[in-house]
Image (spheres, rainbow, N blue to C red):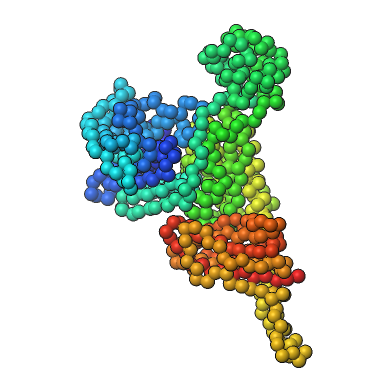
Amino acid sequence: MAGFTNPARAIFTAIRELVENSLDAGETVRVLPEIYIRLSHDDEEEGSNVYTLRVMDNGSGIPAAQVPIALGQFLVGSKFRLKQARGTFGLGGTMAILYGQITTNKPVSIISSTGTSKTYEHRLMIDIQRNRPMILDRKMHINKEVSGELWHGTVVEFHLEGDYYKAMPKVLEYLKQTAIVNPYANITFVDPKGRLYKFDRTATKMPPPPRETLHHPHGVDVETIQRMIRITPCNNMLDFMKEHFHRVGEQIARQFLKFAKMDEDKDPRRLSPDEVVNLVQAMKDFNEFLPPDASCLSPLGEELLRAGILKELEPDFVAVCQRKPSTYSGHPFIVETAVAYGGKIPSRGDILLYRFANKIPLIYDESGDVSWEILKSINWRRYKAAPDMPIAVFVHICSTKIPYKTLGKEIIADRPEVSREILNGIREVARQLQHFLSRREHVKMQVRRLSIFSRYLPKIIEFSTKLGGLQTVPSMDKLYRRETVFKDFITSDQYVASERFDAGLYRTVLVYVRNKHDNSAVNVRVLGFASSKWKELIQEITLGAGSEIYEMLRERVKLVRIEVKSTIQGKSGIVDAFVECLSE
């Protein structure tokens, strides 16, 4: 069974498949996901290799009549439509349950409600020979209100053989990366030793849901066209083009058929094999088709990807890029890339790569992935980056069909269209990293310069005052100024701005912020006022407990303000901050 090749991989795959189902269920009804995972030993002895896995969510729930079919029968997956979705075939949950039944011969327990006044509990097994569920028990319960509304969601509990302690690093890394790419979800995991791992949401905004779409003409092949011809209700080529292809209207259809030298009134079912081949080639050569519409896809978006990276890794710098939509083999796709520096990113002698597909992490088989090949092909010294630096690169692909190499759904294939977008996306964020690293070196020079001025300028002014016989020491604010804007400030869940600092006189302006809290992280951003509007000068960054930043502003502005907030709701930080500047 794909994904269940050994006991450690089986535990990982079972957790992964049920978590993905729970994320899909929450997004279906536009509810912020709350996912609880508990893995426990069946026997009291810690060395037992039989576990009970329980996963509970607050998603859409499954109608009572559909529960046995949805989780006790194969070939009912929803992934055969042209629509972006997690996974490959939509059968992962059933596969995990079947693996548990094969290894333990114990039934699965399922509790579900769609938000009605009743919940339904099923105990069932899968009849493998007949491919149908065997219902052992079915109960109905009164649905209780939770926070003023009736509970909706699904609880799946079953037994399986595995080796959690070998799988533990991969399981924890999977949950961490899931939290990065789904920052709007709360995920709680309790392991067999009772250790609690919590991944709290840091965003309340969810990406738009994906929609079904048609094939794009530039990506279809001969087999796809032949399948369309077999099912089409159209009696002429003009209607055929409008009915079956993405963003093809009457005008473009007429232009294309004229380009392809094909009669508009010809019945598509009467096309010869050679004419089908010529039609496909003409589609590839015709450049007037509109680009694919990204509205059918559900990318994470730059804001949410940045929020997830900041929450889990607390880097000193993050750059995010979302590429324009493209197509391969009739499927639209969008590549999102990011690079992060510092914070909790380890220095391992090589750049760290995080891979995602349709908002799920790809943990295994990294070396065979196209993203890894591209990462290794880039000369990072051009971007002032060295292998021993704490740098992480993130690649997320969303598509109606992810080009996996294997059934394990872990390796992205080397498709030229996909490779090109990944390479260009990584290059774009790498250039921003280069600017950050260059600016950091410049900041160090300015810090040394300011240190000299702050140390000796007051003494020079005092000496000059005495030498000139003046009674009053003149202010040095026009030359050098340092002002504290936050002192022992306790952050809240919303951004709070400091007093405005008048920076109009100064050529060099540096901002210092320190999080003094022992446990909680804070988010920081710096804004400047110029040309009658406020603009972001330093993008949102996360400061972990005890962390600090000392950044120089890249452009001159009239006013400066620092804004801070708690990274995790309800967990305040303590902030000190000052602005230091030097005139021309």
Height in image: 485 above or below 357? below
User: Which image quarter holds the N terminus?
Assistant: top left
Q: Nearer the viewer, residue 219 or 41?
A: 219
Residue 229 in sight: yes
Q: Residue at x 63, y 15 (%)?
A: 238
Q: Tell me if 444 is positioned left or right of 171 in this view.
A: right
Q: Residue furthest right?
A: 468
User: Which image quarter holds the C terminus?
Assistant: bottom right
Residue 31, image x and y in percent? 42, 42
Q: Nearer the viewer, residue 55 or 484?
A: 484
Q: Nearer the viewer, residue 361 or 233?
A: 233
Q: Tell me if 323 is positioned left or right of 569 in this view.
A: right
Height in image: 350 above or below 466? above
Q: Nearer the viewer, residue 336 or 467?
A: 467
Residue 5, image x and y in percent? 39, 36
Residue 356, image x and y in percent? 51, 42
Q: Residue at x 42, y 44 (%)?
A: 32
Q: Tell me if 157 is positioned left or right of 180 in this view.
A: left
Residue 154, image x and y in percent? 33, 38
Height in image: 91 above or below 362? above
Q: Residue at x 61, y 26 (%)?
A: 247
Residue 537 figure quarter? bottom right
